[in-house]
Every structure is written in structure tokens, then in C-alpha cells.
Amino acid sequence: MDKLRELVMTAMGKASMYWEPIPKGVFQSTHAKEIGEKLLADIKQQALNGSEKQSPKCLCCGSENITIECGDCKEKRSFGTWSA
């Protein structure tokens, strides 16, 4: 997460300079840091939510009741009984 934090904060700093004319005054780094930290927290939350396993669905009908056959032993199992 440290590398992501560095990338986000660097990008925010660079983006803050895309003004014409470039603003004068003092860059409010404290506020920029707060925005960056909020963005990183949101990214982390989305990553955690997205990591929840979802049942695979049939591409044709959308059914979650899918059975596949193992290519080695030819045993048929539903996706719900497969272990990672």
C-alpha cells in the first residue's frame, strides 16, 4: 500500500499544477494530504469489498447452478463444492 500511496500523492501534486496561469500563493498540502488519504481509504475499502467471492454464473442464462466436469478424474461437481 506504500507504493500506491506514493503514486496517489505524487499524482495529486502534479495534477494540482495544471492551471493556466499557474496559481500563486501557498499550496495547501494539509488539505491535499487529507484528500489523498480519503482516496486511499476508499480504494482499500473497494478492494476489500471486491475480494468477496461471488458465485460464478452461466454466461448464457445467468444461473448460479453450474456443474462442471474435472478434466482429470471426470468427476462432476457444482461450483459451490469446489475448494480453492
Image (cartoon, helix red, strand yellow):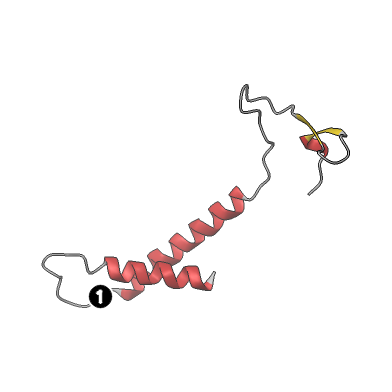
User: Is the residue marked by circle 1 packed among few (<14), some (14-19), or many (20+) residues within 10 Å?
Assistant: few
Q: What element carries label 1?
A: loop
Instruction: Tell me what residue is drawn at x 74 percent, y 26 percent.
Output: 65
Residue tagged by mark 1?
27
| Residue 48 x, y percent position in the rendering | 61, 54
* Relative height, residue 38 to residue 79 (above, below): below
Q: Position of residue 63 (x, y in %)?
A: 68, 25
Relative to 44, say whether 14 is above or below: below
Q: In which quarter of the image is residue 79?
A: top right
Number of marks in the rendered image: 1
Identify which residue is drawn at 74% across, 28% down: 66
Question: Which quadrant is the N terminus positioned in?
Answer: bottom right
Q: Where is residue 72 in the image (x, y as percent from the top left)?
A: 85, 41
Is 79 displayed left or right of 1 in the figure?
right
Q: Nearer the viewer, residue 83 or 68?
A: 68
Image coords of residue 56 (percent x, y): 68, 35
Instruction: Report which quarter residue 58 is drawn in.
Output: top right
Q: In this view, does 26 lie to the left or right of 48?
A: left
Q: In the displayed structure, does residue 24 sit left or right of residue 36?
A: left
| The furthest residue to the left | 21
Position of 59 compared to 65: left or right?
left
In the picture as drawn, the residue positioned furthest to the bottom comes out as 26
Q: In this view, does 42 lie above or below 12?
A: above
Q: What residue type is labelled 1?
A: Phe
18 up-or-down from 24: above or below? above
- Point 12% across, 65% down: residue: 20
